[in-house]
Image: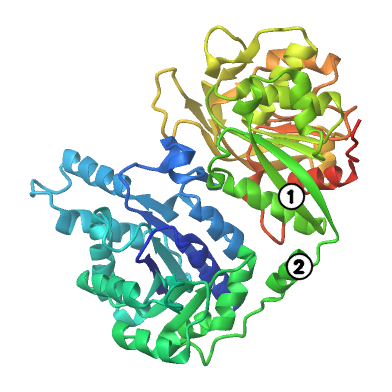
């Protein structure tokens, strides 16, 4: 029978529930169990698709086109499972569903209330689209005590009673602050957080304690006593210098053992195969070289906005046995600089990466960075908006279209990048009007891309003719410029199967210049990097930085 693990957070936010959930899933999968990873966010947005990256970090996109919280990226990278639309829910979506049902008359005229109607909708999510997985892990967003999370905890309490308490484990992530003047870890905040959780009708089964140092045996017994768990169920989540050590650290602390004990499964459980994780950590601890990469972006003030991108660069470094040293540069800072000044700032780097984004801010700075990479033969990689701006830069510099730009930036630009209005998905025509809602109206999820034979793109993907990558955008490069661009050295080497949408551009005469409309960072894994990231770092390692 399926076992359910709920990961709940206490004391403070930003403790890393996503990483904790992902690492727990990784450990259970390493023992040969099938695992499903899911996320509940109590906020009232329907999804994070329209939220600023500064508010909530990156928007992660699943294979089937859901815009989700960045924690689903952690799940996919650590547990190596693909998440789905049905694995993410928000408070806004729950209320939206309830109100739609009320409008349709589904409640037969009943007074619609938080309990049972909202909690029933949450429980419907908990049960939905399951297929007999051994373990289903649910991360509950927010912190115990948050008002917006109250109904989620109530639904979880009801669900545990309905499926049988013996089939549910509550994993409580908490903080043990260190008071330097006293020279000790303090357990009182955790005691209070556990008590608050108990007020919601939920008893924590295992404590996962974030800390800079280990608890002594006496402190562990004390914490167990006041939190109503055994000392063995007090698991230390110690700070580490590499997040990919976390599954190994949790295993050393006995997390997977205690979960299996809780479910009375330890005796028949296979031993975990952690060889892949050990190999990753061995490589990270013994890098043979390093390479400096400049990422010229729009949201560099909050690196969570580029979480998958950063991890994909790390993965590519692991594959190349190289430490990737990333410098995050705000494109906006380049806008008031001359091209020569931008060139001077970018000289120390062996590769230039322009990531995705929305809006006109920083665009001229990105174009200057792209021009530097193109003219100076520096390895270049553009993603989504980065690809579009590579085309804009080529149209300006090579085709002489001085005011080339995107329809996204206003009518005073000549739109060599235009808003998509019609495209095909799963055999169905998708239509978007200029006044369509912003949320959920982009080209989202995995789409096929046909590669040009003999191109750099085809080489990167080992000669295959068609690939699948994930998208998140509402603007496309105008194909009517393809012939002119090709005559000036930039070719479209990847297209949609119907030849209508450009997916990849490259400059064959350049050592490594490639732009992609999709987001390859979403499919990268620590032991299986995305091919384009791997090739980009490989090329950057060959580039020799000079002072001239």
Q: Nearer the viewer, residue 495 or 310?
A: 310
Dot label at residue 371: none
Give the residue displayed 47% in from the left and 80% down from the top: 235
Q: Nearer the viewer, residue 64 or 70?
A: 70
Q: Residues within 10 Å of mark 1 (few under 14, many from 20)?
A: some
Q: Would residue 417 be found to the left or right of residue 46 on screen?
A: right
Q: Position of residue 34 (x, y in %)?
A: 54, 71
Q: Position of residue 354 (x, y in %)?
A: 68, 33
Q: Would residue 29 be found to the left or right of residue 324 on screen?
A: left
Q: Position of residue 93 (x, y in %)?
A: 32, 45
- Is 157 rendered above or below residue 61? below
Q: Please count the marks in the image.
A: 2
Q: Position of residue 185 (x, y in %)?
A: 43, 77
Quadrant assignment for the N terminus: bottom left
Q: Secondary structure at mark 2?
A: helix
Q: Which residue is mark 2?
A: 285
**Quarter of the view holding residue 328:** top right
Q: Is residue 498 visible?
A: no
- Is 179 rendered above or below residue 445? below
Q: Nearer the viewer, residue 5 or 207?
A: 207
Q: Nearer the viewer, residue 217 or 384?
A: 217
Q: Is residue 438 visible?
A: yes
- Is 404 rendered above or below residue 51? above
Q: Secondary structure at mark 1?
A: strand
Dot label at residue 325: 1
Quadrant assignment for the C terminus: top right
Give the residue displayed 35% in from the left and 62% down from the top: 126
């Amino acid at each position: 029978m399926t076992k359910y693990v709920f990961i709940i957070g206490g004391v403070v936010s930003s403790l890393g529930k996503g990483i904790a959930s992902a690492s727990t899933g990784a450990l259970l999968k390493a023992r040969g169990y099938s695992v499903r990873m899911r996320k509940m966010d109590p906020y009232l947005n329907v999804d994070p698709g329209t939220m600023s990256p500064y508010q909530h970090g990156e928007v992660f996109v699943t294979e089937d086109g859901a815009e989700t919280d960045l924690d689903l990226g952690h799940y996919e990278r650590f547990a190596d499972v693909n998440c789905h639309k049905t694995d993410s829910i928000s408070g806004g979506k729950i209320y939206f569903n309830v109100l739609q049902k009320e409008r349709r008359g589904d409640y037969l005229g009943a007074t619609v209330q938080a309990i049972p109607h909202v909690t029933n909708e949450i429980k419907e999510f908990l049960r939905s689209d399951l297929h007999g997985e051994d373990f289903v892990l649910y991360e509950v967003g927010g912190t115990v005590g948050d008002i917006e999370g109250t109904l989620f905890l109530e639904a979880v309490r009801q669900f545990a009673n309905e499926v049988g308490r013996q089939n549910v484990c509550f994993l409580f992530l908490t903080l043990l602050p260190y008071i330097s003047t006293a020279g000790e870890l303090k357990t009182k905040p955790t005691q209070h957080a556990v008590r608050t959780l108990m007020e919601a009708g939920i008893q924590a089964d295992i404590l996962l304690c974030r800390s800079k140092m280990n608890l002594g045996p006496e402190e562990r017994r004390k914490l167990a006593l006041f939190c109503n768990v055994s000392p063995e169920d007090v698991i230390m989540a110690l700070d580490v210098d590499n997040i990919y050590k976390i599954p190994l650290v949790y295993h050393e602390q006995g997390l997977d053992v205690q979960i299996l004990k809780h479910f009375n499964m330890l005796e028949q459980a296979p031993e975990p195969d952690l060889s892949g994780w050990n190999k990753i950590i061995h490589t990270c601890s013994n890098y043979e070289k390093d390479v400096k990469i400049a990422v010229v972006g729009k949201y560099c003030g909050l690196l969570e906005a580029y979480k998958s991108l950063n991890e994909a660069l790390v993965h590519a470094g692991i594959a190349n046995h190289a430490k990737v040293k990333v410098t995050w540069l705000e494109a906006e800072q380049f806008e008031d600089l001359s091209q020569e000044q931008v060139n001077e700032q970018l000289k120390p780097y062996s590769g230039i990466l322009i990531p995705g984004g929305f809006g006109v801010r920083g665009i001229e700075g990105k174009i200057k960075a792209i021009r530097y990479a193109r003219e100076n033969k520096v390895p270049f990689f553009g993603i989504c908006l980065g690809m579009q701006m590579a085309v804009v830069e080529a149209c300006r510099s090579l085709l002489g279209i001085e005011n080339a730009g995107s329809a996204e930036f206003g009518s005073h630009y000549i739109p060599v990048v235009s808003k998509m209005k019609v495209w095909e998905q799963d055999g169905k025509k998708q239509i978007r009007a200029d006044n369509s809602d912003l949320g959920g109206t982009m080209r989202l999820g995995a789409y096929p891309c046909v590669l040009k034979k003999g191109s750099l793109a085809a080489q990167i993907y080992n000669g295959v003719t068609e690939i699948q990558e994930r998208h998140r955008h509402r603007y496309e490069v105008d194909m009517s410029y393809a012939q002119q661009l090709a005559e000036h050295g930039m070719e479209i080497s990847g297209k949609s199967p119907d030849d209508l949408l450009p997916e990849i551009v490259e400059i064959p005469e350049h050592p490594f210049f490639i732009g992609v409309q999709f987001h390859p960072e979403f499919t990268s894994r620590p032991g299986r990097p995305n091919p384009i990231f791997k090739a980009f770092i490989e090329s950057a390692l060959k580039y020799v930085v000079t002072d001239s």
